[in-house]
């Protein structure tokens, strides 16, 4: 700070004034009553006002919005200021940032006479500071960008690494799927074979049934052969029923949707599977509602779903058990539906398996026994009927599958 040690006598005051005027940095002398008593050219340039205009005017005119209060307070309390930053009012009211340093001018052993203040124009410094700040911010932004970029590259590298592993897993899954596809095409072939076989068996069976019926007609009831013949006629009738159904079931046809009674669909499906369940020591119990509403559906496809669920139940009850088949009417969200439920007393499933049973190719059965397609196909079929298929299961206790299909007639 520039402090003018003013010890000069009054007669020398004009000399002090000319010294101030010679100094190239802006200086102003303020009297104790707050009036400007001296300025130099550099100060006039700073505030863009002439010396005549400034000398005699109050200090308030030099600053913006009463900012001089801080200056006056500091001078009154400390008798000097050092690097006090304020805004002066320049030309047209423009703010000119300045730093002010100065102190009281006193004579030896006397009271303060005035204050000599030296101003530093901070405009260039502020501009440079603002530019520096801008450059600093820009640099920060670029550093952030580079850091983000680096993180992105790092993540990408990690992703590539995990993608490689994923691809490896996918390749293995693809291999499995390929094997399963081969298995399912074998099943399709098996279906065709069954249809062909049923067709071939139909002929001789018609002969057996026809002949045995004729012989039965001409045999007296008290004959030793009558009961045996009757058994042959009944058995061939049952065989005919199974074969006919097998033919219908394995025949591929575009699904036609018709009004259906789900009880009839269940009975037809069990013509094929009932004997198999019986042979595995599984007792089938039917609990079918008499007032089940009709649904719009395709019997063949729904039979496929039922047979699949029943044969899974059979696989889950290796030691035998009970399969309860029931139907009832349900209402949810204002929609009336017919529901079929299949409850077995088999091994049941843990939550991890239950969550995946409808996934294509999900199977827990050994290779060659399961394709993992049954329930995913069933799911698709039920969805085609605008229906729902759900499962509840408890490990070691059993499983129940519910199939719910909206009723055709929704009137209450
Ligand atoms: P797959 O029978 O060929 O395995 P599914 O899609 O029909 O294929 O069944 C998938 C899996 O769901 C089965 O492997 C089995 O683990 C499980 N599952 C299905 N039904 C039952 C059931 N009633 N009891 C226990 N587990 C079942």
Image (cartoon, rainbow, N blue to C red):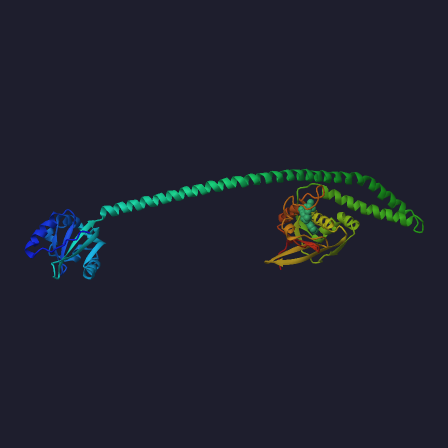
Query: In this view of the protein, can residue 11 be seen by the observer?
Result: yes
Measuring 20% from the left and 56% from the top, which residue is drawn there?
Answer: 81
Measuring 28% from the left and 46% from the top, which residue is drawn there?
Answer: 130
Q: Classify 47 as above or below 79.
A: above
Q: Position of residue 153 (x, y in %)?
A: 46, 40
Q: Position of residue 374 (x, y in %)?
A: 68, 45
Residue, far front: 109
Q: Nearer the viewer, residue 72 or 157?
A: 72
Q: Is residue 278 left or right of residue 102?
A: right
Query: In this view of the protein, can residue 301 be seen by the observer?
Result: no
Measuring 43% from the left and 41% from the top, which residue is drawn there?
Answer: 149
Q: Which corner quadrant of the image does residue 291 belong to?
A: bottom right
Q: Nearer the viewer, residue 313 or 155?
A: 155
How many marks the image carries: the answer is 0
Q: Is residue 348 left or right of residue 88?
A: right
Residue, far right: 223
Quarter of the figure with the C terminus: bottom right
Q: Position of residue 48 (x, y in %)?
A: 15, 49
Residue, far left: 11
Q: Nearer the viewer, residue 391 or 240?
A: 391
Q: Position of residue 385 (x, y in %)?
A: 63, 49
Measuring 31% from the left and 45% from the top, which residue is drawn there?
Answer: 134
């Amino acid at each position: 700070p520039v402090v003018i040690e003013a010890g000069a006598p009054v007669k020398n005051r004009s000399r002090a004034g000319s010294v101030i005027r010679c100094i190239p940095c802006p200086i102003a002398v303020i009297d104790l009553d707050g009036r400007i008593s001296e300025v130099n050219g550099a100060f006039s340039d700073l505030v863009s006002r002439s010396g005549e205009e400034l000398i005699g005017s109050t200090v308030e005119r030099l600053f913006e919005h009463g900012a001089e209060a801080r200056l006056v307070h500091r001078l009154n309390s400390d008798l000097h200021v050092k690097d006090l930053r304020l805004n002066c009012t320049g030309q047209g009211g423009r703010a000119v940032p300045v730093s002010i340093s100065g102190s009281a001018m006193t004579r030896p052993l006397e009271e303060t006479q005035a204050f000599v203040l030296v101003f530093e124009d901070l405009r260039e410094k502020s501009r440079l500071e603002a530019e520096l700040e801008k450059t600093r911010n820009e640099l920060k932004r670029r550093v952030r960008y580079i850091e983000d970029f680096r993180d992105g590259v790092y993540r990408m590298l990690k992703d590539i690494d995990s993608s490689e592993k994923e691809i490896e897993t996918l390749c293995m899954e693809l291999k499995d799927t390929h094997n399963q596809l081969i298995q399912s095409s074998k099943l399709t072939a098996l279906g065709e074979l069954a249809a062909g076989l049923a067709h071939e068996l139909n002929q001789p069976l018609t002969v057996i049934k026809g002949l045995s019926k004729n012989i039965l007609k001409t045999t007296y009831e008290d004959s030793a052969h009558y009961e045996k013949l009757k058994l042959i006629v009944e058995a061939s009738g049952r065989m005919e029923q199974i074969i006919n159904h097998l033919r219908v079931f394995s025949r591929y046809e575009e699904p036609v949707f018709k009004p259906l009674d789900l009880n009839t669909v269940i009975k037809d499906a069990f013509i094929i599977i009932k004997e198999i369940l019986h042979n595995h020591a599984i007792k089938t119990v039917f609990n079918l509602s008499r007032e089940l509403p009709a649904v719009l559906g395709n019997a063949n496809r729904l039979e496929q779903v039922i047979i699949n669920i029943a044969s899974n139940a059979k696989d889950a009850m290796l030691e035998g058990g009970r399969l309860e088949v029931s139907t009832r009417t349900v209402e949810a969200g204002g929609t009336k539906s017919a529901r079929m439920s299949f409850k077995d007393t088999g091994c049941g499933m843990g939550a991890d398996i239950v969550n995946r049973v409808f996934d294509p190719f999900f199977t827990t059965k050994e290779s060659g026994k399961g394709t993992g397609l049954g329930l995913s196909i069933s799911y698709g079929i039920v969805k085609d009927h605008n229906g729902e298929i759900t499962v509840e299961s408890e490990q070691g206790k059993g499983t129940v599958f519910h199939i719910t299909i909206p009723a055709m007639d929704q009137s209450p």
